[in-house]
Amino acid sequence: MCKTQPKKPYFNGNQKHISFLTATMNAIRESNIPLYSSKFSRKDYNQHQLLALLVFKEYLGVRYREIIELVEVMDAIQILLGITRIPHFTTLCKFSSRISSTALSQVSKQASSFSYRGRGRVSTIAIDSTGFSTEYFSYYYSVRTEKTRKDFIKISLAVDTEKQTILGDKITKSRQHDTKHAKPLLRNTSKKAECYVLDRGYDSEQIHLQIRTELQAKSIIPIRNWNADYVKGEFRKEMSDNFDRIRYGQRNKVETVFSVIKRRFGDQIKSRRFRSQVKELKLKCIVYSIDLFLKKQRIFITD
């Protein structure tokens, strides 16, 4: 006889790190990332092991030296990753520069898929953007020169409002308009939805048209000026005449995802080069997805 204890978490106590690394390794293996980047590799460590350490480093919010020091004293992590010798922290640093953003996107997609059993559409996807500040510049130098730095990286996310999973991302350094992020993001989400909700910054007849014709879904985007005498566009006029405020309220879920990522995994980017900054943000998305999945798990005990 099987008895379920829904209140007992799968992810707690001393097993927290092992549980996280186990799920991380599963996501990496199922992402079809090759074990070695070249047939001439020394094969001291494989890409799965080093990438798992990178994700773990982002999860803990530590630096390269600190994550290696932690692995040195935790035999369970060494056994789980299958490493017989501890890598130098510079090995992990160089691997971080070498791994591609495409590979991280594959892992992120796989990590979010853990929350789903079927391949069907989700109910509602919300899209919004936020900024992560960069911290590599000297605040003291900024004060002395009286030049306030405003560098930030912009990221737009497509989020399933029911499960609060990340289904797609778009990252840029320039101050691009939201509509430029929305078009590729809508096209490249890992799952499609029955309805897409976006805020008024995305108010565009072209975005409505893309959602209605290309994705065969409903779009809910408030118009910029509710007091306008004339609204141009068939779908924008529909929003003006018949706006579903109840369903649009689900858009706030994407703000919740941004809040969780920034509070738990940091709201600043430490990398200096843009390519590395993109990878750091993608790692944050992977960490969020795996952490969310583990928190929703339950233990099943057999009597």
Image (tube, helix red, strand yellow):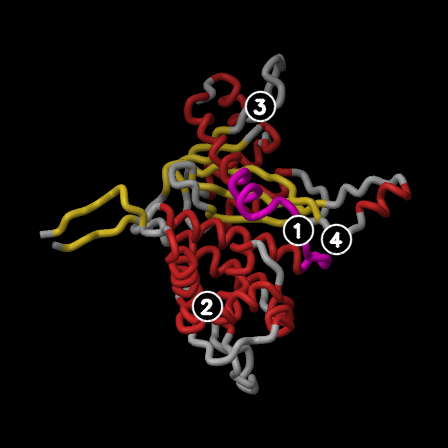
Q: Position of residue 169 (x, y in %)?
A: 54, 48
The residue to which callout 3 is attached is 223
Q: In which image quadrant can residue 54 be found?
A: bottom right
Identify the secondary structure beneath mark 3: loop
Residue 261 lies in magenta, yes or no?
A: yes
Identify the residue at image location x=53%, y=21%. Answer: 237
Q: Depth-wise, is mark 3 or mark 1 nearer the camera?
A: 1
Instruction: Check disc 3 and give the amino acid type.
Output: Ile
Let me know if residue 59 is in the magenta part.
Answer: no
Which label sits in the foreground, 3 or 2?
A: 2
- Residue at 69% x, 45% y is 133
Q: Earlier in the sequence, mark 1 or mark 2?
A: 2
Stretch in magenta? 258-275
Q: Quadrant of the C terminus?
A: bottom left
Give the secondary structure at mark 1.
Answer: strand
Q: Disc 1 and disc 4: Cα gap in Å? A: 8 Å
